[in-house]
Amino acid sequence: MKRMSFVQALNDALDIMMAEDERVFLLGEDIGHMGGDFGVTRGLFTKYGGERVRDTPLSEAAIIGTAVGAAMVGMRPVPEIMFADFLGTCYDQIVNNAAKMHYMFDGQFKAPIVIRTAAGGGFGGGPHHSQSVEGWFMNVPGLVIVGPSTPQDAKGMLIACIENDNPVLFLEHKALYRVRGDVDEGKFSVPLRKAHIAREGTDVTIVASMKMTHEALAAAEELAAENISVEVVDLRTLRPWDTQTVLESVAKTGRAIVANEAPKMGGLGSDVSATIAEECFSHLKAPVKRVCGLDTPIPFSVPLEKVILPNKDDIKKAVQDTLAH
Amino acid sequence: MDGNTVLELYRKMWVVRAFEQGLEREFKKGNVPGMLHTGLGQEAVQAAIANSLRKTDAFFPDHRAHGLLVLAGTPGEKIMAELFGKATGVCSGKGGSLHSADPSVGNFGDNAVEGSMMATALGVGLAYKMQKRDDLAAVIVGDGTAGRGEWHESLNLAATWKLPVLYCCVNNGYAISTAVGDSHATAELYEFACAYKMQSVQVDGNDVVEAARVTAEAVDWIRQGKGPFFIEYKTWRWQGIFSGEFRPAEEIRYWKEEHEPMKLARDYMVKNHIADDAVLEQIKAEVEAQVETWITFALESPPPDLSKATANVYVGWEVETR
């Protein structure tokens, strides 16, 4: 066990996989000698060289296309898209190429790529450096979406994703990069499609992921002082998400809050709350409540951004409202 | 070029022609679902490409390359059946005309979003280079692709990284109804590759002897590790647009009668005493008869098992069924 930041945990995972498997290589903008915009690939260029830690031009479609093509012939590419907001420029490669290939060629090809990208807001990044994009990709069969919330999960899930045969969109919330935590040393993997009960409780379930997991845990801590027992389910894999763990928790507590930083309409929060309503109706003591981003772009000015993005207090209020129902 | 090679190219061209004519006939009868893009008029290009690739190479076919899929080595009936959406097709009927992949012969499948596979081909080329193989990735694209961002991203990176990628640009003059020169800075598309400092050439795509010679040279160049190569094949497609023919009568006459690929090949062989009309007729008849057996196979094949509808969405994971 070692104390390290989210960034160091990701770096450790990449290092372990590159040392073990020469099919693993990285490509992206400024990931080489600079070590990436957020330092995730720092030191790997020196250790593994420019062939396997490959700097690219600002050609996101080519970055993903290159990764897909290499994966088709046995490589294990881990492309980085600097900011999740830029995924629009390679959306086609992900949606129509990586995610569909295994299906449309009926199993003859697969595209095991792990697209790492920095997502999420809260730091004044403005409209094109702050978005939570999971909703853009929720409707894409064949794609896996992962969003860890702790350094331990970041490392274990990145290793699991590199070893998985499906294309993965790996979301790294920027607000979590400097978060520190205990991380197991050496190689280990955290299973995909398995949510984690981040806090046990009996009165209400909060389903969250990434930064929202931390907001939910902070809310739960404060609510405990009011004798409210909150269970926090950290989804970790956002698509296909772990319905069993969520439904079991809601069946136990009878109340559900779904917290998601992205805009409410058509997003992950919608899918989770609809599934709870469909599958868990007889257990519910109150309607499912969503705590999501407002239906706007993300403004630059921080006070304005705070209006848009959900936080601990919004979650707390939702819990109180649900209990008062 | 030696006579036997030319005769073999001629046979390949007839595979393309007979396949497409049979397919078009069945499409009109309602036996082929979806949309149809035929390679009629572009036979020489496909024969030339097939002549130079080997099974360990990768190729990404374009919308009009059904014949090439067969020339690459997949049994014709399995391609035909795929186009009919049948269980016996190469992708169990799940891919269809635009996604009939067969890795066993290096066929990596078309991508219906024109140009997207130019980026995919980069990855295959890069991997082959990293794996120290001397195989290449060929990507066959139409002229309409030149407007896509991936066209430019791909040419730039292949040239920068010196990747073993062969660009086969089939310039048939029109992207559906829009003439190349009306929507691009140049109608001579190899000039784009020149701008990216890539070895490039323009060739008469209806002259199979010349097209095959140029393609073989390009493949040699790539196999020597000298980097990518771009070939622009000037040709013309017979198929009009959905509503019918839109091109001037004189243009149609030139390409379908005077500068028609089969005629040019025949003239070459007769002039050079490679074969007489009787031999050439024999080749045509043999290929046409073979294509009819593929069509019969496709017609008689069963539809895919309905469990295929939800199979292979994820590797190793099931999805909900109805």
Image (cartoon, coloured by chain):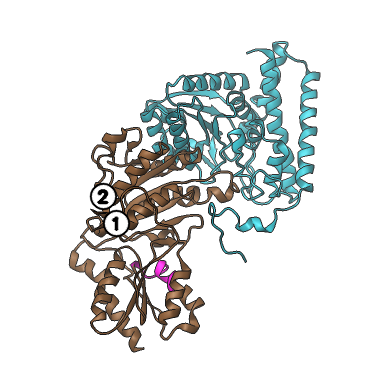
Chain colours: A brown, B cyan
In this image, B131 relative to B29: left or right? left
Residue reaching furthest to the front: A1
Name the spot of residue A9 as percent of width and height, x first.
29, 51
- Residue B13 vertical placement versus A27 (above, below): above
The residue at 48%/27% (across/down) is B133
Question: What quarter of the picture does the N terminus of chain A occupy?
Answer: bottom left
The range drawn in magenta is A261-274
Examine the rendered structure and indicate whether residue B57 appears above or below residue A169. above
Nearer-the-camera pick, A68 or B219: A68
Mark 1 Cα shell of 10 Å, populated few (<14), some (14-19), many (≥20): many
Name the residue type under label 2: Gln
Chain bearing mark 2 = A
Residue depicted at 63% across the width and 29% down the height: B255
Q: Which residue is mark 1?
A: A151
Is A22 contained in the magenta span?
A: no
Q: Quadrant of residue A286?
A: bottom left
Q: Secondary structure at mark 2?
A: helix
* Screen quadrant of the C terminus of chain A: bottom left
Is residue A173 in view from this perspective? no
Taking A151 as reference, is A295 above or below it?
A: below
Q: Nearer the viewer, residue A85 or A285?
A: A285
Task: Tell me the SS state at disc 1.
Answer: helix
Asked whether B117 or A154 is in front, the reply is A154
Q: Nearer the viewer, residue B9 or A54?
A: A54
Chain at numbered mark 1: A
**Mark with earlier residue (2, 1):** 2
Quarter assignment of residue A77: top left
Looking at the image, can residue A156 be seen? yes
Q: Which residue is farthest top? A: B273
Which label is found at residue A8?
2
Q: As displayed, is residue A60 above or below residue B199? A: below
